[in-house]
Image (spheres, rainbow, N blue to C red):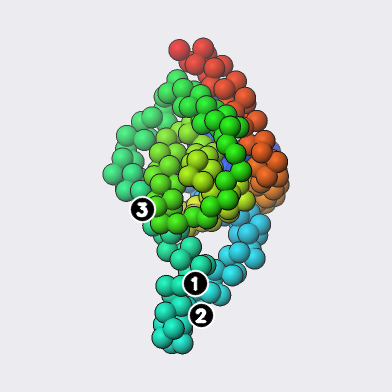
Amino acid sequence: MDILQAILLGLLQGITEFLPVSSSGHLALGRALLGRDLEPGITFEIVVHFGSFCSIAVYFHKKIREIFTDLFKSFSPSGIRSKRFVTDSNTRLSYIILLSMIPAGIVGFTMKEYIEVIFLNPFFVSCMLLVTGTLLFSTKFMGNPQKDVDIKRGLLIGVAQAFAILPGISRSGTTISVSLFSGMSREKAAIFSFLMVLPVLAGAMLLEMTEIVETGIETAAVISLFVGFLTSFISGYFALTYLIILLKREKFHYFAYYCWTVGVIGIFYFF
């Protein structure tokens, strides 16, 4: 892989991972149009996903630090005696994040082969982009909800994340939309949506790391990998910033027009 390919694939990952337009859908359509040339390889895929992981970690570093600090306090001897592990809000949030991972984990482990087959069907992916667009557009009619995440909402959003394993269904678009429908505020919906994917990304990277250990990394590929990581990290950070600005301004539904356009073109092209 040359430097230009690394930059393009890093941009693709960084931008579409956060904007509600389905990164997996774009990759599936790109492969259908360009063939195996767009196949990044397992090592590069892990590296650019790590770039996305770092984007979230840097953007929400204050909240993440608060959660870990409160977790430490909650499970300290004094925290256990005072039952802080039950009453602290950030500790409860960490429980809900773990709970929200269960549906996606079940779907990922039990339906992996079927989902991989779907990735090869660009017509299906195009149809799913229409579904994503419709879901995003429906948020236009939401009022100004102000509720916080709880166990029921967390599990519901986790189910939405599991559904978004399908290529063409945006993970961020689905989880944020469902969060808004459940009554959560826009800011809290965005925070929970991206915090809940951190353990998922970390787990996926750890599983795929075993293959890197077996195959190793060529010295000549190090520069391309670094460029891919850096591109994914920088573009992901700005895409995340832009998304949250639009979300706060109640313009989240604007992405529906893009999804509909790509979906309709894909349906006619691959029919």
Q: How far apart are marks 3 and 1 (CA)?
A: 22 Å
Residue at x-position 33% and y-position 44%? 107
From the viewer's side, name the closer residue of 96 and 241.
96
| Of labels 3 and 1, the one closer to you | 1
Who comes first in sequence, dot 3 or dot 2?
2
Residue at x-position 36% and y-position 31%? 117
| Mark 3 touches mark 2? (CB < 8 Å) | no
Q: Distance between the residues labelled 2 and 1?
A: 9 Å
| Mark 2 touches mark 1? (CB < 8 Å) | yes
Amino acid at circle 2: Lys
Q: Is residue 78 above or below residue 6?
A: below
Asked if one can make out residue 23 in the rendered structure from this viewpoint, the answer is no
In this figure, which residue is indicated by the disc labeled 2?
A: 73
In this figure, which residue is indicated by the disc labeled 3?
A: 102
Residue at x-position 38% and y-position 29%? 118
From the viewer's side, name the closer residue of 189 and 41.
189
Amino acid at circle 3: Ile
* Quarter occupied by the C terminus: top left
Q: In this view, does 195 lie above or below 259?
A: below
